[in-house]
Amino acid sequence: MYDRPRFLPAGDRAIVVEFGNEINPEINRRVRNLYLALQRSGIGGIGEMIPTYRSLLIYYDPMQLPLNQLIDYIQEVEADMERLKLPHPKIYVIPVIYGGEYGPDLEDVARYNQLTPGEVIQIHTATDYLIYMLGFAPGFPYLGGMSLRIATPRLKTPRTHIPAGSVGIADKQTGIYPIDSPGGWRIIGRTPVKLYDPYREPPVLLSAGNYVRFVSITAEDYHKIKAAVEQNTYTLQELPVELGG
């Protein structure tokens, strides 16, 4: 982590504020805090902002806010961020049916790591995963904290169709496909919860800075929850981090 953030111009209407050069929870916390602090500031001239693992991309209008003024303002906000009352993180509880037609790569992941499928599920559900950022597809969460005991390389040949809700592993990462798409992650299960729905407000279910906890469910549970999701009667369980351990 850098002692002070780096400011990297990205064309004539954007700047990258970089806090470090590694995947690190503290670096990511500083990125999210700056994002929230600038959102609250209401300063004119700041447009869309895109948080990533270790930096924040800020679009701005140079006619309203010259670059040097923007940097001065960011430095003021960044220096005072620790005193801000920012939202406390929560845990999203994501039900997942593992294996079978829903997780065709579960047995391969187990075989690669010399585990049983049940042990893979136990390890995968034993961690609360920090949502570092969203990207790749609308609402796709990049999750940190997966055990190296179940780390598995991506598929050599990606699939052309991965169903929405599929839960996958790629090397040291795990994530959830929010929409139908191609993909090369090893699919170990599927959730009936919709991570992205263009007719919902907000359309994206999860948000960076919070956590995901996977829980294993039966086929009967899966179909009940799926029916409730389709009828808009399903409420995602959320827990405070204190209760999650």
Image (spheres, rainbow, N blue to C red):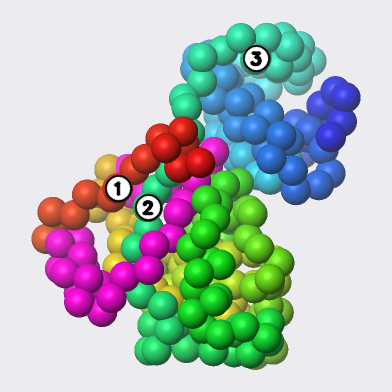
Residue 118 on image: x %, y %: 49, 80
Q: Secondary structure at mark 3?
A: helix
Whether label 3 touches label 1, CB < 8 Å: no
116 to the left or right of 102: right
Disc 1 vs disc 2: Cβ atoms closer than 8 Å? yes
Q: Which of labels 3 and 1 is toward the front?
A: 1
Q: Is residue 47 magenta?
A: no
What residue did someone put label 1 on? Answer: 237
| Residue 220 falls inside the magenta stretch | yes
The residue identified by callout 2 is: 93
Total residue callouts: 3
Residue assigned mark 3:
82
Please name the residue shown 68% across and 22% down the image: 62
- Amino acid on which the number 1 mark rests in the picture: Gln
Q: CA distance from mark 2 to mark 3?
A: 28 Å
Mark 3 or 1, nearer chain start: 3
Q: Going by the image, does 94 lie left or right of 221?
A: right
From mark 3 to mark 1, how far is it between C-alphas?
A: 29 Å
Badge 3 local density, few (<14 within 10 Å), some, or many (20+)? few
Q: Which residues are magenta?
A: 202-230
Q: CA distance from mark 1 to mark 2?
A: 5 Å
